[in-house]
Protein backbone atom coordinates (compact mmCIF):
# COMPACT_ATOMS: atom_id res chain seq x y z
CA UNK A 1 0.00 0.00 0.00
CA UNK A 2 1.39 3.40 -0.97
CA UNK A 3 1.99 6.10 1.63
CA UNK A 4 3.56 9.54 1.86
CA UNK A 5 6.49 10.01 4.19
CA UNK A 6 6.64 13.67 5.16
CA UNK A 7 9.23 15.43 7.28
CA UNK A 8 7.47 18.57 8.41
CA UNK A 9 8.55 22.01 9.44
CA UNK A 10 9.78 23.25 6.05
CA UNK A 11 8.02 26.44 4.82
CA UNK A 12 6.86 26.06 1.22
CA UNK A 13 8.45 28.55 -1.13
CA UNK A 14 8.33 29.01 -4.89
CA UNK A 15 6.05 29.02 -7.91
CA UNK A 16 3.52 26.53 -9.14
CA UNK A 17 1.02 26.26 -11.98
CA UNK A 18 -2.64 25.29 -11.61
CA UNK A 19 -4.00 22.55 -13.89
CA UNK A 20 -7.51 21.92 -15.23
CA UNK A 21 -10.40 21.30 -12.84
CA UNK A 22 -11.45 17.71 -12.12
CA UNK A 23 -14.99 18.80 -11.29
CA UNK A 24 -15.26 20.69 -14.59
CA UNK A 25 -13.73 18.07 -16.84
CA UNK A 26 -15.82 15.13 -15.59
CA UNK A 27 -19.23 16.53 -16.64
CA UNK A 28 -17.71 17.93 -19.86
CA UNK A 29 -16.38 14.49 -20.79
CA UNK A 30 -19.74 12.94 -19.93
CA UNK A 31 -21.46 15.52 -22.17
CA UNK A 32 -19.37 14.44 -25.17
CA UNK A 33 -21.57 11.32 -25.52
CA UNK A 34 -24.35 13.62 -26.76
CA UNK A 35 -22.20 14.90 -29.61
CA UNK A 36 -22.18 12.86 -32.83
CA UNK A 37 -18.85 14.33 -33.81
CA UNK A 38 -15.33 14.82 -32.44
CA UNK A 39 -14.75 17.00 -29.39
CA UNK A 40 -11.34 18.18 -28.28
CA UNK A 41 -10.99 18.87 -24.57
CA UNK A 42 -7.88 20.70 -23.43
CA UNK A 43 -6.43 21.14 -19.96
CA UNK A 44 -7.44 17.63 -18.87
CA UNK A 45 -5.66 16.71 -15.63
CA UNK A 46 -4.06 13.29 -15.24
CA UNK A 47 -6.17 11.95 -12.38
CA UNK A 48 -7.65 8.60 -11.43
CA UNK A 49 -11.25 9.91 -11.74
CA UNK A 50 -10.51 11.18 -15.25
CA UNK A 51 -9.01 7.81 -16.24
CA UNK A 52 -12.18 6.08 -15.03
CA UNK A 53 -14.39 8.50 -17.00
CA UNK A 54 -12.35 7.89 -20.17
CA UNK A 55 -12.61 4.12 -19.60
CA UNK A 56 -16.40 4.47 -19.32
CA UNK A 57 -16.57 6.45 -22.58
CA UNK A 58 -14.55 3.71 -24.30
CA UNK A 59 -16.73 0.98 -22.80
CA UNK A 60 -19.79 2.75 -24.28
CA UNK A 61 -18.12 2.67 -27.71
CA UNK A 62 -16.53 6.13 -28.00
CA UNK A 63 -13.12 6.56 -29.56
CA UNK A 64 -10.88 8.27 -27.06
CA UNK A 65 -7.40 9.56 -27.71
CA UNK A 66 -5.26 11.23 -25.12
CA UNK A 67 -2.13 13.19 -25.83
CA UNK A 68 -0.76 14.97 -22.78
CA UNK A 69 -3.44 17.25 -21.44
CA UNK A 70 -5.58 17.07 -24.58
CA UNK A 71 -8.30 14.47 -24.99
CA UNK A 72 -10.20 13.82 -28.18
CA UNK A 73 -13.54 12.02 -27.96
CA UNK A 74 -15.48 10.75 -30.95
CA UNK A 75 -18.84 9.48 -29.70
CA UNK A 76 -20.47 8.96 -33.11
CA UNK A 77 -20.78 5.19 -32.87
CA UNK A 78 -21.75 4.37 -29.30
CA UNK A 79 -23.02 0.80 -28.88
CA UNK A 80 -24.18 0.80 -25.28
CA UNK A 81 -26.28 2.91 -22.94
CA UNK A 82 -25.29 0.93 -19.88
CA UNK A 83 -22.49 2.27 -17.70
CA UNK A 84 -20.45 -0.80 -16.65
CA UNK A 85 -21.12 -1.37 -12.92
CA UNK A 86 -17.46 -2.08 -12.10
CA UNK A 87 -16.50 1.37 -13.46
CA UNK A 88 -19.55 3.05 -11.92
CA UNK A 89 -18.41 1.74 -8.52
CA UNK A 90 -15.00 3.33 -8.98
CA UNK A 91 -16.35 6.84 -9.41
CA UNK A 92 -19.50 8.54 -8.18
CA UNK A 93 -19.35 11.09 -10.97
CA UNK A 94 -20.30 8.41 -13.50
CA UNK A 95 -23.85 9.41 -12.54
CA UNK A 96 -23.23 12.35 -14.93
CA UNK A 97 -23.72 9.98 -17.84
CA UNK A 98 -27.37 9.62 -16.98
CA UNK A 99 -28.50 12.97 -18.44
CA UNK A 100 -26.46 12.81 -21.68
CA UNK A 101 -27.22 9.15 -22.54
CA UNK A 102 -30.91 9.62 -21.82
CA UNK A 103 -30.93 12.79 -23.94
CA UNK A 104 -29.33 11.12 -26.94
CA UNK A 105 -30.71 7.57 -26.87
CA UNK A 106 -33.87 7.79 -24.75
CA UNK A 107 -32.47 5.22 -22.35
CA UNK A 108 -29.71 4.74 -19.82
CA UNK A 109 -28.93 2.33 -17.11
CA UNK A 110 -26.49 2.84 -14.27
CA UNK A 111 -25.88 1.08 -10.99
CA UNK A 112 -26.83 3.14 -7.96
CA UNK A 113 -23.89 5.16 -6.62
CA UNK A 114 -23.27 4.27 -2.98
CA UNK A 115 -23.02 6.66 -0.07
CA UNK A 116 -19.52 7.61 0.95
CA UNK A 117 -17.66 8.79 3.97
CA UNK A 118 -18.68 12.43 3.56
CA UNK A 119 -22.41 11.71 3.69
CA UNK A 120 -25.27 9.76 2.14
CA UNK A 121 -25.09 11.66 -1.17
CA UNK A 122 -28.48 10.67 -2.58
CA UNK A 123 -29.38 11.41 -6.21
CA UNK A 124 -33.08 12.06 -5.67
CA UNK A 125 -32.91 15.57 -7.22
CA UNK A 126 -31.38 14.09 -10.38
CA UNK A 127 -34.09 11.44 -10.64
CA UNK A 128 -36.96 13.79 -9.84
CA UNK A 129 -35.69 16.11 -12.58
CA UNK A 130 -35.42 13.28 -15.13
CA UNK A 131 -39.02 12.28 -14.32
CA UNK A 132 -40.21 15.88 -14.71
CA UNK A 133 -38.54 15.97 -18.15
CA UNK A 134 -40.70 12.98 -19.11
CA UNK A 135 -38.50 9.97 -18.34
CA UNK A 136 -39.71 6.79 -16.70
CA UNK A 137 -37.31 5.97 -13.88
CA UNK A 138 -37.12 2.46 -12.52
CA UNK A 139 -34.99 1.60 -9.49
CA UNK A 140 -34.45 -2.13 -9.00
CA UNK A 141 -31.79 -4.39 -7.45
CA UNK A 142 -29.32 -1.54 -7.11
CA UNK A 143 -29.78 -0.39 -10.71
CA UNK A 144 -31.46 2.71 -12.10
CA UNK A 145 -32.95 2.62 -15.57
CA UNK A 146 -34.36 5.74 -17.22
CA UNK A 147 -36.29 5.60 -20.49
CA UNK A 148 -38.16 8.16 -22.59
CA UNK A 149 -39.41 8.37 -26.15
CA UNK A 150 -38.77 12.10 -25.93
CA UNK A 151 -37.84 14.52 -23.20
CA UNK A 152 -39.89 17.70 -22.86
CA UNK A 153 -38.79 21.05 -21.47
CA UNK A 154 -40.21 21.78 -18.04
CA UNK A 155 -39.91 23.97 -14.93
CA UNK A 156 -37.76 22.46 -12.17
CA UNK A 157 -36.95 23.73 -8.68
CA UNK A 158 -34.14 22.05 -6.78
CA UNK A 159 -34.59 21.63 -3.00
CA UNK A 160 -30.89 22.52 -2.58
CA UNK A 161 -28.51 23.99 -5.18
CA UNK A 162 -26.86 20.65 -5.97
CA UNK A 163 -23.92 20.89 -8.34
CA UNK A 164 -24.32 17.41 -9.81
CA UNK A 165 -28.10 17.66 -10.23
CA UNK A 166 -27.82 21.07 -11.93
CA UNK A 167 -25.24 19.67 -14.37
CA UNK A 168 -27.07 16.41 -15.05
CA UNK A 169 -30.38 18.19 -15.68
CA UNK A 170 -28.82 20.82 -17.94
CA UNK A 171 -27.36 17.95 -20.01
CA UNK A 172 -30.66 16.07 -20.09
CA UNK A 173 -32.48 19.24 -21.22
CA UNK A 174 -30.09 20.21 -24.03
CA UNK A 175 -31.72 17.93 -26.63
CA UNK A 176 -35.26 18.06 -25.17
CA UNK A 177 -38.29 19.57 -26.89
CA UNK A 178 -38.84 23.14 -25.69
CA UNK A 179 -37.52 25.17 -22.78
CA UNK A 180 -36.38 23.87 -19.39
CA UNK A 181 -35.97 26.26 -16.48
CA UNK A 182 -33.98 25.12 -13.43
CA UNK A 183 -34.65 27.22 -10.32
CA UNK A 184 -32.40 27.22 -7.25
CA UNK A 185 -29.64 25.95 -9.53
CA UNK A 186 -26.10 25.66 -8.18
CA UNK A 187 -23.82 28.52 -9.31
CA UNK A 188 -20.40 26.88 -9.16
CA UNK A 189 -17.91 27.91 -11.89
CA UNK A 190 -17.80 24.28 -13.09
CA UNK A 191 -21.45 24.65 -14.14
CA UNK A 192 -20.64 27.73 -16.19
CA UNK A 193 -17.77 25.81 -17.76
CA UNK A 194 -20.08 22.93 -18.72
CA UNK A 195 -22.59 25.40 -20.21
CA UNK A 196 -19.79 27.09 -22.18
CA UNK A 197 -18.76 23.74 -23.61
CA UNK A 198 -22.33 22.77 -24.50
CA UNK A 199 -22.98 26.17 -26.10
CA UNK A 200 -19.81 25.75 -28.19
CA UNK A 201 -21.36 22.51 -29.44
CA UNK A 202 -24.54 24.36 -30.47
CA UNK A 203 -26.63 24.04 -27.30
CA UNK A 204 -28.63 26.97 -25.90
CA UNK A 205 -27.95 27.22 -22.17
CA UNK A 206 -28.46 30.62 -20.56
CA UNK A 207 -27.98 31.81 -16.99
CA UNK A 208 -25.32 29.28 -15.92
CA UNK A 209 -23.61 30.70 -12.84
CA UNK A 210 -26.91 32.22 -11.70
CA UNK A 211 -29.65 30.59 -9.68
CA UNK A 212 -32.00 30.29 -12.64
CA UNK A 213 -30.72 28.37 -15.66
CA UNK A 214 -32.70 28.26 -18.89
CA UNK A 215 -32.08 25.57 -21.50
CA UNK A 216 -33.72 25.77 -24.90
CA UNK A 217 -33.65 22.34 -26.54
CA UNK A 218 -31.88 21.91 -29.89
CA UNK A 219 -31.97 18.95 -32.31
CA UNK A 220 -28.32 18.24 -32.63
CA UNK A 221 -24.90 19.08 -31.18
CA UNK A 222 -21.72 19.44 -33.22
CA UNK A 223 -18.07 18.98 -32.23
CA UNK A 224 -16.07 21.71 -30.50
CA UNK A 225 -12.75 22.52 -28.90
CA UNK A 226 -12.90 23.45 -25.24
CA UNK A 227 -10.34 24.24 -22.53
CA UNK A 228 -11.51 23.48 -19.00
CA UNK A 229 -11.17 26.07 -16.23
CA UNK A 230 -8.32 25.89 -13.69
CA UNK A 231 -8.95 23.80 -10.61
CA UNK A 232 -9.97 26.21 -7.83
CA UNK A 233 -9.82 23.47 -5.21
CA UNK A 234 -6.26 22.47 -6.15
CA UNK A 235 -5.30 26.17 -6.21
CA UNK A 236 -6.93 26.65 -2.81
CA UNK A 237 -5.21 23.57 -1.38
CA UNK A 238 -1.79 24.88 -2.46
CA UNK A 239 -2.54 28.32 -1.02
CA UNK A 240 -3.60 26.80 2.29
CA UNK A 241 -0.49 24.55 2.33
CA UNK A 242 1.74 27.60 1.80
CA UNK A 243 -0.04 29.55 4.56
CA UNK A 244 0.03 26.54 6.90
CA UNK A 245 3.80 26.15 6.59
CA UNK A 246 4.21 29.93 7.01
CA UNK A 247 5.66 30.01 3.52
CA UNK A 248 5.30 32.02 0.34
CA UNK A 249 3.80 30.99 -2.98
CA UNK A 250 3.33 32.34 -6.47
CA UNK A 251 0.41 30.56 -8.10
CA UNK A 252 0.10 30.90 -11.88
CA UNK A 253 -2.78 30.06 -14.18
CA UNK A 254 -5.40 30.38 -11.45
CA UNK A 255 -8.79 32.06 -11.69
CA UNK A 256 -8.70 34.35 -8.61
CA UNK A 257 -12.36 35.36 -8.93
CA UNK A 258 -13.28 31.71 -8.19
CA UNK A 259 -11.33 31.85 -4.92
CA UNK A 260 -12.90 34.92 -3.29
CA UNK A 261 -14.21 33.19 -0.15
CA UNK A 262 -10.84 31.56 0.58
CA UNK A 263 -8.83 34.71 -0.13
CA UNK A 264 -11.04 36.67 2.32
CA UNK A 265 -10.56 34.07 5.05
CA UNK A 266 -6.79 33.90 4.55
CA UNK A 267 -6.55 37.69 4.72
CA UNK A 268 -8.68 37.68 7.87
CA UNK A 269 -6.12 35.28 9.38
CA UNK A 270 -3.28 37.67 8.55
CA UNK A 271 -1.96 36.04 5.36
CA UNK A 272 -0.85 38.51 2.69
CA UNK A 273 -2.55 37.71 -0.62
CA UNK A 274 -2.00 39.80 -3.73
CA UNK A 275 -3.72 39.20 -7.02
CA UNK A 276 -2.84 40.33 -10.47
CA UNK A 277 -4.78 38.77 -13.33
CA UNK A 278 -4.18 34.98 -13.17
CA UNK A 279 -1.35 35.22 -10.65
CA UNK A 280 -1.82 34.92 -6.91
CA UNK A 281 1.04 35.93 -4.61
CA UNK A 282 0.79 34.70 -1.08
CA UNK A 283 3.00 35.23 1.94
CA UNK A 284 2.30 34.02 5.42
CA UNK A 285 3.59 35.60 8.64
CA UNK A 286 4.67 33.31 11.49
CA UNK A 287 1.58 33.95 13.59
CA UNK A 288 -1.95 33.55 12.19
CA UNK A 289 -5.30 34.45 13.75
CA UNK A 290 -8.16 31.95 14.25
CA UNK A 291 -11.24 32.54 12.05
CA UNK A 292 -14.71 31.05 11.76
CA UNK A 293 -15.57 29.20 8.58
CA UNK A 294 -18.98 28.16 7.32
CA UNK A 295 -19.19 26.14 4.13
CA UNK A 296 -21.92 26.98 1.62
CA UNK A 297 -22.75 26.58 -2.04
CA UNK A 298 -20.73 28.87 -4.34
CA UNK A 299 -19.86 31.72 -3.92
CA UNK A 300 -19.67 30.68 -0.24
CA UNK A 301 -16.67 28.92 1.29
CA UNK A 302 -16.25 25.61 -0.62
CA UNK A 303 -16.93 22.43 1.33
CA UNK A 304 -14.03 20.87 -0.61
CA UNK A 305 -11.62 23.24 1.16
CA UNK A 306 -13.09 22.75 4.63
CA UNK A 307 -10.70 19.93 5.60
CA UNK A 308 -7.51 21.62 4.27
CA UNK A 309 -8.61 24.84 6.00
CA UNK A 310 -9.11 22.97 9.25
CA UNK A 311 -5.53 21.69 9.08
CA UNK A 312 -4.37 25.32 8.76
CA UNK A 313 -6.56 26.43 11.68
CA UNK A 314 -5.07 23.85 14.07
CA UNK A 315 -2.08 26.12 14.78
CA UNK A 316 -3.76 29.53 14.44
CA UNK A 317 -3.87 31.66 17.57
CA UNK A 318 -7.28 31.42 19.24
CA UNK A 319 -10.39 29.33 18.67
CA UNK A 320 -12.00 28.77 15.25
CA UNK A 321 -15.49 27.44 14.65
CA UNK A 322 -15.94 25.44 11.43
CA UNK A 323 -19.51 24.76 10.31
CA UNK A 324 -20.07 22.20 7.53
CA UNK A 325 -23.36 23.07 5.84
CA UNK A 326 -23.18 21.11 2.58
CA UNK A 327 -22.43 17.49 3.57
CA UNK A 328 -23.62 15.92 6.79
CA UNK A 329 -20.55 13.82 7.63
CA UNK A 330 -17.48 15.59 6.41
CA UNK A 331 -15.31 15.59 9.52
CA UNK A 332 -13.55 12.20 9.15
CA UNK A 333 -10.17 13.97 9.08
CA UNK A 334 -10.69 15.32 12.62
CA UNK A 335 -9.62 12.12 14.43
CA UNK A 336 -6.48 11.91 12.30
CA UNK A 337 -5.61 15.57 12.95
CA UNK A 338 -6.12 14.86 16.66
CA UNK A 339 -3.49 12.08 16.46
CA UNK A 340 -1.09 14.81 15.39
CA UNK A 341 -1.89 16.94 18.42
CA UNK A 342 -4.74 19.09 17.08
CA UNK A 343 -7.33 20.17 19.64
CA UNK A 344 -10.72 19.81 17.93
CA UNK A 345 -14.19 19.00 19.28
CA UNK A 346 -17.00 18.04 16.95
CA UNK A 347 -20.66 18.41 17.65
CA UNK A 348 -22.73 17.19 14.69
CA UNK A 349 -21.87 19.56 11.82
CA UNK A 350 -19.76 21.99 13.86
CA UNK A 351 -16.10 21.65 14.79
CA UNK A 352 -14.40 23.85 17.35
CA UNK A 353 -10.68 24.12 16.69
CA UNK A 354 -8.53 25.45 19.50
CA UNK A 355 -5.16 26.54 18.15
CA UNK A 356 -2.12 24.67 19.52
CA UNK A 357 1.50 25.87 19.16
CA UNK A 358 2.45 22.97 16.88
CA UNK A 359 1.39 19.61 15.46
CA UNK A 360 3.59 16.54 15.83
CA UNK A 361 4.20 13.86 13.20
CA UNK A 362 2.15 10.63 13.34
CA UNK A 363 0.84 7.77 11.19
CA UNK A 364 -2.52 8.85 9.75
CA UNK A 365 -4.91 7.54 7.14
CA UNK A 366 -6.82 9.42 4.44
CA UNK A 367 -10.42 8.20 4.12
CA UNK A 368 -11.56 10.70 1.50
CA UNK A 369 -10.03 12.97 -1.12
CA UNK A 370 -10.02 16.40 0.53
CA UNK A 371 -9.57 15.00 4.03
CA UNK A 372 -6.45 13.31 2.63
CA UNK A 373 -5.14 16.65 1.35
CA UNK A 374 -5.70 18.07 4.85
CA UNK A 375 -3.50 15.33 6.33
CA UNK A 376 -0.72 16.07 3.85
CA UNK A 377 -0.89 19.75 4.86
CA UNK A 378 -0.84 18.77 8.54
CA UNK A 379 2.22 16.59 7.84
CA UNK A 380 4.00 19.55 6.23
CA UNK A 381 3.21 21.70 9.29
CA UNK A 382 4.12 19.12 11.91
CA UNK A 383 7.31 18.66 13.85
CA UNK A 384 8.93 15.35 12.92
CA UNK A 385 7.80 12.57 10.59
CA UNK A 386 4.31 11.86 9.33
CA UNK A 387 3.13 8.91 7.31
CA UNK A 388 -0.09 9.46 5.33
CA UNK A 389 -1.78 6.26 4.15
CA UNK A 390 -4.76 5.81 1.82
CA UNK A 391 -3.16 7.66 -1.09
CA UNK A 392 -5.65 6.35 -3.66
CA UNK A 393 -8.16 8.85 -2.23
CA UNK A 394 -5.75 11.75 -2.75
CA UNK A 395 -4.71 10.62 -6.24
CA UNK A 396 -8.36 10.79 -7.36
CA UNK A 397 -8.21 14.58 -7.30
CA UNK A 398 -4.60 15.78 -7.10
CA UNK A 399 -2.10 15.25 -9.88
CA UNK A 400 1.16 14.06 -8.27
CA UNK A 401 0.65 16.24 -5.21
CA UNK A 402 3.98 15.02 -3.81
CA UNK A 403 5.90 16.20 -6.89
CA UNK A 404 4.19 19.62 -6.86
CA UNK A 405 4.95 20.04 -3.15
CA UNK A 406 8.55 18.86 -3.50
CA UNK A 407 9.06 21.53 -6.16
CA UNK A 408 8.07 24.03 -3.48
CA UNK A 409 10.66 22.67 -1.06
CA UNK A 410 8.58 20.15 0.87
CA UNK A 411 10.24 17.02 2.21
CA UNK A 412 7.69 14.46 0.97
CA UNK A 413 8.29 11.05 -0.59
CA UNK A 414 5.88 8.49 -2.00
CA UNK A 415 6.63 5.07 -0.49
C1 LIG B 1 -19.98 18.24 -6.27
C2 LIG B 1 -18.48 18.10 -6.36
C3 LIG B 1 -17.89 17.91 -4.97
C4 LIG B 1 -18.34 19.03 -4.05
C5 LIG B 1 -19.85 19.20 -4.08
C6 LIG B 1 -20.34 20.42 -3.32
C7 LIG B 1 -18.14 17.10 -8.53
C8 LIG B 1 -17.71 15.93 -9.32
N1 LIG B 1 -18.16 16.96 -7.21
O1 LIG B 1 -20.49 17.02 -5.73
O2 LIG B 1 -16.46 17.91 -5.08
O3 LIG B 1 -17.95 18.72 -2.72
O4 LIG B 1 -20.31 19.35 -5.45
O5 LIG B 1 -19.70 21.58 -3.78
O6 LIG B 1 -18.42 18.15 -9.08
N2 LIG B 1 -28.08 16.18 -2.53
C9 LIG B 1 -29.29 15.55 -2.32
N3 LIG B 1 -29.89 14.96 -3.40
C10 LIG B 1 -29.36 15.00 -4.66
C11 LIG B 1 -28.14 15.65 -4.85
C12 LIG B 1 -27.52 16.24 -3.76
O7 LIG B 1 -29.79 15.49 -1.20
O8 LIG B 1 -29.99 14.46 -5.59
C13 LIG B 1 -27.37 16.81 -1.38
C14 LIG B 1 -26.03 16.10 -1.09
O9 LIG B 1 -26.21 14.96 -0.29
C15 LIG B 1 -25.26 17.19 -0.38
C16 LIG B 1 -25.75 18.46 -1.10
O10 LIG B 1 -26.98 18.11 -1.73
O11 LIG B 1 -25.60 17.25 0.97
C17 LIG B 1 -24.79 18.99 -2.13
O12 LIG B 1 -24.43 17.98 -3.03
P1 LIG B 1 -24.03 18.25 -4.56
O13 LIG B 1 -23.90 19.72 -4.77
O14 LIG B 1 -24.98 17.49 -5.41
O15 LIG B 1 -22.61 17.58 -4.64
P2 LIG B 1 -22.05 16.71 -5.83
O16 LIG B 1 -22.55 17.22 -7.12
O17 LIG B 1 -22.20 15.26 -5.51
Image (cartoon, grey):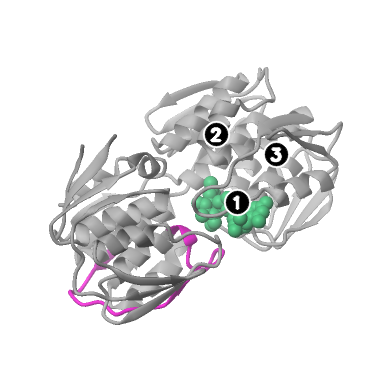
- For residue 258, the mark is none
Q: Does residue 170 show up magenta in the picture?
A: no
The location of residue 196, given as percent across then percent down, is 60, 47
Asked if residue 17 shows in the view, the reply is yes
Which one is closest to the eye, mark 3 or mark 2? 2
Quadrant of the image for the C terminus?
Answer: top left
Residue pointed to by mark 3: 99
SS label for mark 1: loop
Q: Residue at x 55, y 21 (%)?
A: 58
Asked if residue 222 shows in the view, the reply is no
Name the side, left or right, on which 407 lies relative to 212.
left
Establish if 186 lies above or below 70.
below
Q: Which sits earlier in the primary sequence, circle 3 or circle 1?
A: 3
Establish if 190 lies above or below 329.
above
The location of residue 257, given as percent across then percent down, is 45, 64
The location of residue 321, given as percent across then percent down, is 42, 77
Q: CA distance from mark 3 to mark 2?
A: 18 Å
Q: Is mark 1 within 8 Å of ligand 1?
A: yes
Establish if 396 lies above or below 246.
above
Q: CA distance from mark 2 to mark 1?
A: 14 Å
SS label for mark 3: helix
Q: Residue at x 65, y 50 (%)?
A: 122
Residue pointed to by mark 1: 121
SS label for mark 2: helix
Residue pointed to by mark 2: 89
Amino acid sequence: MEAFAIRGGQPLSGETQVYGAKNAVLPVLAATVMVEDTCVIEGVPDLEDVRVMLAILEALGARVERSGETVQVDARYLHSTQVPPELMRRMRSSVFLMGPLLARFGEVSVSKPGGCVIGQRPIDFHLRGMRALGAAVEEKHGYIRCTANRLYGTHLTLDFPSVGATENLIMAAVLADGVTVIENAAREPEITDLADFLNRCGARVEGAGEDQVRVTGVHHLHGAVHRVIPDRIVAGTMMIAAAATRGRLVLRGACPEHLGALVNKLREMGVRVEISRDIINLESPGCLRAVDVRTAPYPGFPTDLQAPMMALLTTAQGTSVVRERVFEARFKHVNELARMGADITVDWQTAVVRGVPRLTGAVVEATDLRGGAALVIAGLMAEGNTRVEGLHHIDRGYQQIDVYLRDLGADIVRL
